[in-house]
Amino acid sequence: MDFSPTEEQALAVESFRRFVERDIKPVTDTLRDAPYPKETAHALLGKVMEFGVGNGWVPVEDGGCGLDFLSSGMLFETLARFAPDLAGIAWVTDGAALKIQQTASPEVKARYLPGLVSGDLIGCSAISEPDVGSSVRELRTRAVRDGRYFRLTGEKMWTSNATVADIVTVLARTGEDDFTMFLLDRKEHDFEAREIPKLGLNGWPLCQVILNDVVVSEANVLGTVGRGLKEVMKGFERSRCFVSALALGIGQAAFDDARAYAMERRQFGKPIAGHQLIQSLLAQMATDLDAARLLTYRALWLMSSGRRCEMEAAMAKAFTAEAMLRVASNAIQIHGAFGVTKEFPVERHFRNARMLTIPDGTTQINHLIMGKNITNISAFA
């Protein structure tokens, strides 16, 4: 396995990096911890989609960029280094677009996919509920058939993008042990989305979605009635890989800021980068970054090869999220008292990194997934 970027990948990443620093970072830096206005989210999403970020997983014949997952992961990592909130919005939209490309009827696909791959539409996916997280089979949102329609009632939590999204894919119970995915259109379906205040990544909406007898046509079913859970579970490997890519970008930003500060800050007659303890911290950070990148790139490479990577994706997610939190914490330590102030960006890197130990399987849930693969014994009920 050689994860060295090809010449084409290296050129694409470098070109994208220059673009993001020039055209995206100045805008997102002014927003900082403020939620992105919907108009801003659309405008920025449209720009990064020109590079295949937010529409990279959809095949070229359907209007996307048709990137392999490893190339896409490198681009998402680059964006998250400078604008992690936008990277999150783009990642969730990319997932919604791929879901529609793979499961929607030709009519629904023709109606929504062009907007999703151009940035005109923003997508999201509603799965978790207030009392239902990792045990998806316990979800309570119900869809009851009413002739050629379904009536959806329930509450979803931790739904990224919902306040700026134009379309939402919703997983609902349609039988005792049957689950179905539906597509909801904000213009046509009366659902409510509320922003949830949180620790970090505050420009990237995290929301509660309330469904109160929402009437949805059977034409808006994604895939087959009763088989929605299978479709959802297939996406978790991909999600864990790309959460890892976002975490890598945040960790790299924290490392870059810490190294620059250590070179500039002087104590005892020389830059603090010349002191042994600071060099030790930087060495630990660099090692965490390299180890996390190798695990993440391996999982992305396996997905690009069309192979299952449940174990590798869980390893990448669990290790990378925790390692990047260590990197961000050490960046604060190198900055000393300045590190805990909002005058420097490392406190924001720390808050952002802390957010990513939770979604798409907490560190502990991913450890159980690894344990099942190691022992062939499930720790889940």
Image: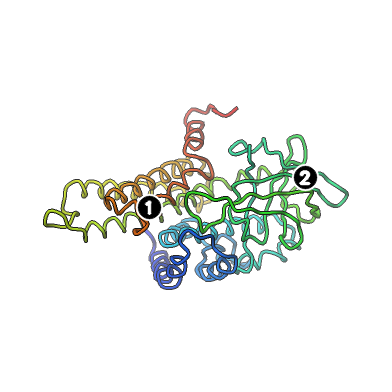
Residues at marks 2 and 1, CA–CA distance in whole angstroms = 43 Å
Q: Is residue 173 left or right of residue 284?
A: right
Under mark 1, the amino acid is Glu
Quarter of the image that includes the C terminus? top right
Q: Which residue is mark 1?
A: 347
Q: Residue at the far left: name it.
A: 269
Residue drawn at x 57%, y 65% is 37
Q: Specify few, some or many for label 1: CA neighbours under 10 Å numbering under 14, 14-19, or 20 or more.
A: many
Q: Say which residue label 2 marks.
A: 143
Residue at the image point whose x is 28% and y is 46% from the top: 284
Horizontal placement of 335 versus 66: left or right? Answer: left
Residue 46 position within the rendered picture, expressed as x and y whole percent measured from the top left: 56, 70
Few, some or many C-alpha atoms within 10 Å of disc 2 (few <14, some 14-19, many ≥20)? many
Task: Tell me which corner region of the image, top left, top right, bottom left or bottom right, holds residue 55.
Answer: bottom right
Query: How far across and how far down the image is residue 249, in percent?
Result: 41, 56
Q: Is residue 203 left or right of residue 146?
A: left
Question: Residue 270: image x %, image y %?
Answer: 13, 57
Against 169, is 45 above or below? below
Q: Amino acid at mark 2?
A: Ala
